[in-house]
Image: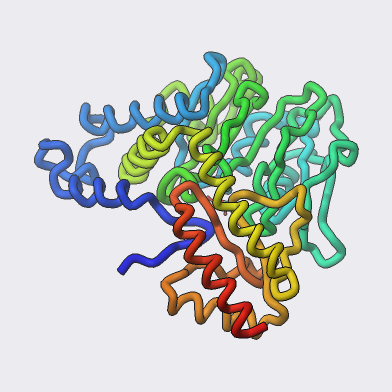
């Protein structure tokens, strides 16, 4: 029996995607080979690859000025590639430090060149419970770029409107909310996201870049680290993670069939309303530290009255086939990830369990 999977990433994949992959695993579309066995230079894989790139561009509603790229190495490689390409000596880049991953991105940039925190929302104990108010974001108008993390996976906070970057090129780590809602891609110089939450399995990052901005990138980098080289090579500069690309393509088709980014947003809002509504109603039993205006539609962080009760919650939930909810060690408690593949009925199963647990243990 399949469990309901609230893991933060790698995360739940839509069942039809897994079923389709199973159906074609041994013989991909009558070719007599698995997609796992096809050459990345052959026409069969090329169709898969091209379709994944173009579906990503379509669903992100990328303007003509922007191009999609796929690169191995997950989002952490992007933490390094971004400053390597765009943070030239003598310049500085701004980072909005709103969570664990935002801080890692910032620290990685500081290894490459000068980087500055345009805000830091950390509490004294290191946790983050909100994104900054517009007045708290102090952008250096000469910065090479402003980097934001649109959804803070570990602390369960999310930007609900775009920050004003004051004309500075805006870059976003959208790992945990990409294609969970529509965004105006034209406002971003570069967007990146690891696939393993909303788009498919682990193994690659999807990127959207403004080609004019890309013209300002350094050209003296090793090829493998250059966005321009990956773009020029249509993301086949070297062997891509072909199976991951194939699965991302299947998931993008599933997103398209379910209403695209706005369809996902409707679905995600309904799930988050149900979960946060339950937490608010049971607030004598559960605590949810993120400030209401900053609550993430993707990751809900909460806890019961004690770490022992949290453990019991997780143990009993497992018996109900509800899995993957242990919070990150930096936040503690529980974290429920409500990515695209999670359905409203999955969340209904969870909220019923939360109600009964609170009744029994409260
Ligand atoms: C917002 C965010 N950025 C970056 C990362 C790191 O991604 P990866 O493990 O693909 O390097 C994560 C992983 O969970 C994340 O949630």
Q: Quadrant of residue 356?
A: bottom right
Horizontal side of residue 268 vs 2, given as left or right = right
What residue do we see at 75% from left, 45% from top? 110
Picture coordinates of residue 200, whole percent (x, y): 41, 46
Looking at the image, residue 142 sits to the left or right of residue 13; the answer is: right
Q: Is residue 4 above or below residue 304?
A: above
Q: Residue at x 63, y 24 (%)?
A: 217
The answer to whether residue 137 is seen in the rendering is: yes
Up/down of 214 relative to 314, above or below: above
Residue 107 seen from this side: no
Quadrant for the C terminus, please. bottom right
Front residue of 227 and 177: 177
Is residue 233 or residue 97 the one in the foreground?
A: 97
Q: Say which quadrant the N terminus sits in.
A: bottom left
Residue at coordinates 47% horizontally, 65% vertically from top-left? 349
From the viewer's perspective, is residue 252 above or below residue 186?
Answer: below
Q: Quadrant of residue 218?
A: top right
* Quadrant housing residue 330: bottom right
Give the percent coordinates (x, y) of residue 154. Answer: 65, 58
Residue 305 on image: x %, y %: 72, 79
């Amino acid at each position: 029996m399949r469990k309901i999977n609230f893991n933060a990433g790698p995360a739940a994949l839509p069942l039809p995607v897994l079923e389709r992959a199973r159906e074609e695993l041994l013989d991909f579309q009558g070719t007599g080979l698995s997609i796992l066995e096809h050459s990345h230079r052959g026409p069969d894989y090329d169709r898969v690859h091209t379709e994944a790139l173009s579906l990503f561009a379509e669903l992100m509603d990328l303007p003509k000025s922007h191009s999609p790229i796929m690169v191995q190495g997950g989002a952490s490689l992007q933490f390094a590639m971004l400053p390597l390409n765009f943070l030239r000596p003598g310049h500085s880049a701004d980072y909005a430090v709103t969570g664990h991953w935002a801080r890692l991105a910032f620290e990685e940039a500081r290894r490459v060149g000068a980087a500055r925190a345009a805000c830091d929302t950390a509490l004294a104990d290191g946790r983050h419970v909100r994104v900054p108010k517009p007045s708290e974001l102090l952008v250096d108008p000469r910065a090479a770029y402003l980097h934001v993390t649109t959804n803070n996976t570990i602390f369960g906070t999310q930007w609900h409107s775009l920050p004003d970057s004051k004309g500075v090129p805006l870059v976003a780590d959208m790992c945990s909310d990409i294609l969970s809602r529509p965004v105006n891609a034209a406002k971003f110089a570069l967007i990146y996201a690891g696939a393993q939450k909303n788009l498919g399995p682990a193994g690659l990052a999807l990127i959207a870049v403004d080609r004019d901005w890309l013209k300002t990138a350094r050209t003296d980098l090793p090829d493998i680290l250059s966005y321009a080289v990956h773009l020029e090579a249509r993301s086949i500069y070297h062997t891509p993670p072909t199976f991951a690309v194939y699965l991302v393509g299947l998931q993008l088709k599933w997103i398209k069939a379910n209403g695209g980014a706005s369809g996902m947003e409707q679905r995600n809002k309904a799930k988050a309303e149900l979960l946060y509504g339950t937490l608010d109603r049971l607030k004598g039993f559960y605590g949810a530290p993120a400030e209401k205006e900053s609550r993430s539609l993707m990751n809900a962080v909460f806890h019961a009255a004690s770490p022992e009760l949290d453990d019991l919650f997780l143990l009993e939930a497992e018996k109900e086939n509800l899995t993957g909810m242990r919070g990150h060690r930096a936040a503690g408690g529980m974290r429920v990830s409500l990515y695209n593949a999670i359905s409203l009925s999955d969340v209904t199963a969870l909220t019923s369990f939360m109600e009964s647990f609170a009744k029994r243990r409260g």
